[in-house]
Image: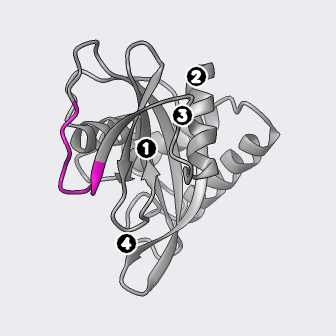
Amino acid sequence: MSNSQPTGSLHADALDVLTGWQAADAAQGLLRDDYVAFLRAHDNGMWRECEAGHITGSAVVLDSTRSRVLLTLHPKVGRWLQMGGHCEPADVSLRAAASREALEESGIAGLVVSEQPIRLDRHEIRCRPGIVLDHLDVQYLAIAPIDAVAAISEESLDLRWFSVDDLPSDTDDSVRALISAALQH
């Protein structure tokens, strides 16, 4: 795999975003460095076809008061998660990918998405039958408009607002960490 990247590509945007991102702590800084090394080693690292894993974009959606979080019950994982998923060819940036996923999965128009990521999370997930790959998730904050009405998508078993102080008992630690980061942003 070559290290050269097309100018203006989603891959180049991801490298720019990640190399310029100020991590909140040493662990997040090490994870950022891993993401950058991964992208430098994999020209196709933005796409689900990359068998070494791939970058994904997500957004945690908070209501305008920041007292509630919108979570989706993911059909493959069977847990309440933030909105997010794979990058698509039409995405011009990581932020655009996270924004698109948040809109598609929440049904909420007018989300205001943070300019920079608020957290990174690396996790394994089955993307294709029998194949488990690393998702190198770049996570953003999205604030819903005051009058937001969520609408469930085909990609979810359920969609609900939860108090940030009363999350489902089986909420994953990574989702809790993302919500905590969002509340500090």
Q: Which mark is residue 82?
A: 1
Binning the other alpha carbons within 10 Å of mark 3 as few (below 14), some (14 to 19) or many (20 upward) gives few
Residue 183: numbered disc: 2
Say what amino acid the circle numbered 3 marks. Asp
Residue 19 place in picture, x, y as percent? 63, 38
Q: Nearer the viewer, mark 3 or mark 1?
A: 3
In what element is the residue under mark 4?
A: loop
Q: How many C-alpha atoms fall within 10 Å of the one at disc 1: few (<14), some, or many (≥20)? A: many
The mark closer to the camera, 2 or 4, is: 2
Residue 37 among those drawn in magenta: no
Count neighbours of disc 2 (C-alpha within 10 A) and say few if under 14, some if 14 to 19, many if 20 or more: few
Which badge, 1 or 2, is on the more N-terminal residue? 1
Type of secondary structure dominating the magenta stretch: loop
Which residue appears at 22% of the width and 47% of the height? 90
The amino acid type found where label 1 is placed reads: Gln
Q: How far apart are labels 2 and 4 at the CA level?
A: 34 Å
Point out the stretch of residues depicted in magenta: 150-158
Hey, what amino acid is under mark 2?
Leu
Residues at marks 3 and 1, CA–CA distance in whole angstroms:
15 Å
- Determine contact: label 4, label 1, CB under 8 Å: no
The x, y position of residue 172, in whole percent, is 58, 52
Q: Which residue is mark 3?
A: 166
